[in-house]
Image: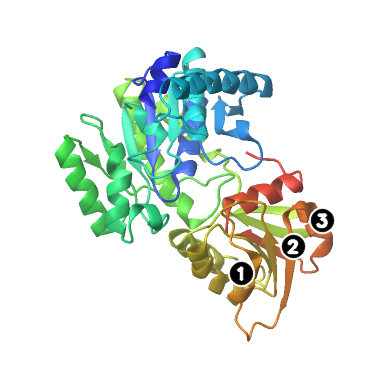
Amino acid sequence: MYRLMAAGGVCCAGPFLHVAGTNGKGSVCAMLERGFREIGLRTGFYSSPHLVHWNERIRINGQPIPNEDFIELIAHWDQLARSIATEDPLTVPSSFEILTAAALDYFQRLAVDVSILETGFGGRWDATNAVYPEICAITTIGLDHTEFFGEGEADIAWEKAGILKGGVPVFVGNVSPSAFSVIEKVAEAVGVLVLRPGEFILPPLQFLHGVEQEENFQLARAIARHWLCGLKKFDGDTWHRCIHGMTQARWSGRWDRREIQGKSWIFDGTHNVHGLNMLKKNWENLPSDFRRRPTVVAAMLGQRRAEDLMPFFCSVASELVLVSLDEERATPVDTLRSLVPDDFSGKVIIFPEEDLGKLPDTISCDFVLVAGSLHLVGKTMGALNLDIG
């Protein structure tokens, strides 16, 4: 990654805010971006994965990079990557590394005031970790990608804490004591100040829903306050406008409630155990007249995730729509079907990805939950031509 960035003349240091975590990092980044934009700063926001279109991952002032700029940028960086691979076959930049370098290049070209970077995978070896930021953050620690990072929260916390760098303060969200202990040890080793968000009465969030967003807002608020104080841009009016902007943040596909053809839909990117715990809390908080047995549209990436999530989906569903995703890592629908208990009384429908646009006409229930994978949520929202914030 360093070699690729050097080849393209991209700086590793700059006004970067770097956010890692198992869940919540995209929402925290979206809140920060919206708050800073509200006070007149020019923002860059790099996130992953995208829901519908690749250029969602690179945003300037909240808007995805235009298609023509995206195509030109990726072609340029792909050529640089090919040159590096030709010179040294053992150093072949991945597609994510190319995309990350392209995003940093774009932010540098457009001279943004702040670049907000969401890690893609883990932290320590993530492509975004090539930057030297002004603030780091770790949102949550939960069991996910255990085949790469280890079976326990301590192992995963150590990987996420790999983004810590000497002299750069780190904000840590709602993590377990064991995970926090690991982060503290890494912070002490590299000489980092560990900060926790305080408890404040929160203003209502306009577009983001779910109990997890309250925790995310507390963390984003603390990061924004610290960073603005460092810029000496902290005054009452600026802070009020920043907070107001943060409450207006949009981040689609996270406990995202929509009305489609007279039916109530919830799109939720829950795909691991930590996210499932939040999903259960959100489910319990639904109004009693709303919490009826829905049609659950589900797909997952990986056997373990399917084993973790399917029991809850089966417990609340009146019928199951198991989607066959056109994705190499997708759990086969036969495997999903085998995880449905024998006493499940509802209908089980096997549904191909290419027919997702027909779901509203296929489902008889007036309440639909789409969950299990952000890939599924994005494909479904795209097929239904929904607005993506």
The percent position of residue 266, horizontal first and vertical second, equals 65, 57
Residue at image point 38% right, 57% down: 146
Sequence-wise, the earlier of marks 3 and 2 is 2
The percent position of residue 41, horizontal first and vertical second, equals 48, 20
Q: Which residue is mark 3?
A: 358
Q: Amino acid at mark 2?
A: Phe
Q: In screen coordinates, is 80 left or right of 152?
A: right
Q: Residue furthest right?
A: 361
Q: Residues within 10 Å of mark 3 (few under 14, many from 20)?
A: few
Q: Nearer the viewer, mark 3 or mark 1?
A: 1
- Residue 371 showing in the rendered view: yes
Q: Which residue is mark 2?
A: 351
Q: Is residue 270 above or below residue 126?
A: below
In what element is the residue under mark 1? helix
Q: Amino acid at mark 3?
A: Lys
The percent position of residue 49, horizontal first and vertical second, equals 54, 41
Sequence-wise, the earlier of marks 3 and 1 is 1
In what element is the residue under mark 2? strand
